[in-house]
Amino acid sequence: MSVVFAITFGLLGLAGLLTLVRIVRGPRTLDRILAVDVLVVLIVAGTAVGMAMSLRGIYIALIVVVALLGFVGTISVVRLVERREEYR
C-alpha cells in the first residue's frame, strides 16, 4: 500500500510544480487565479492522502475549511477582476 501512497504523492507534487509554472507564466490574470485554485485543491488532496495513509481522520475539519476558503476566495477574486478588466 505504501507504493500507492508514494506514487500518489509524487503525482500530486508534479501537478503542484506544473501549477506553479502556470502561476508564474500567466499569461492573464484569470489564468493565475485558476492556477491558485488548482493549487488549493492539490493541497486538500495531499492532506486527504496523508490522512488516509496514517489511518486517522483528525484533519477532516481542516480539509473542509481549506476547500471552502479556496472556493469562496476564488469566486471573490474572479468577480473583482471581472469588474476591473475587460474580457471578451
Image (cartoon, helix red, strand yellow):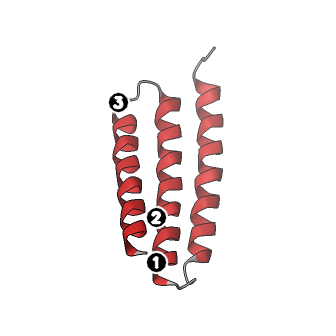
* Viewer-nearest residue: 10 or 26: 10
Mark 1, residue position: 53
Residue depicted at 59% across the width and 25% down the height: 84
Q: Is residue 39 above or below residue 9?
A: above
The CA distance from mark 2 to mark 1 is 10 Å
The CA distance from mark 2 to mark 3 is 24 Å
Q: Quadrant of residue 88?
A: top right
Q: Are marks 2 and 3 in contact (CB under 8 Å)?
A: no
Mark 2 is surrounded, within 10 Å at the Cα level, by few (under 14), some (14 to 19) or many (20 or more) other residues, namely: some
* Viewer-nearest residue: 70 or 7: 7
Look at discs 2 and 3 and give the one toward the viewer.
2
Look at discs 1 and 3 and give the one toward the viewer.
1
Left or right side of 46 for 75: right
The CA distance from mark 1 to mark 3 is 34 Å
Residue depicted at 40% across the width and 47% down the height: 15
Mark 2, residue position: 46
Secondary structure state at the residue bearing disc 2? helix
Look at discs 2 and 1 and give the one toward the viewer.
1
Image x and y of residue 62, in percent: 56, 73
First along the sequence among labels 2 and 1: 2
Residue depicted at 45% across the width and 73% down the height: 50
* Viewer-nearest residue: 61 or 83: 61
Secondary structure state at the residue bearing disc 3? helix
Secondary structure state at the residue bearing disc 1? helix
Q: Please, what is the three-letter code of the amino acid marked with disc 2? A: Gly
Residue depicted at 48% across the width and 55% down the height: 42
Q: Quadrant of the N terminus?
A: bottom left
Mark 3 is surrounded, within 10 Å at the Cα level, by few (under 14), some (14 to 19) or many (20 or more) other residues, namely: few
Q: Please, what is the three-letter code of the amino acid marked with disc 3? A: Arg
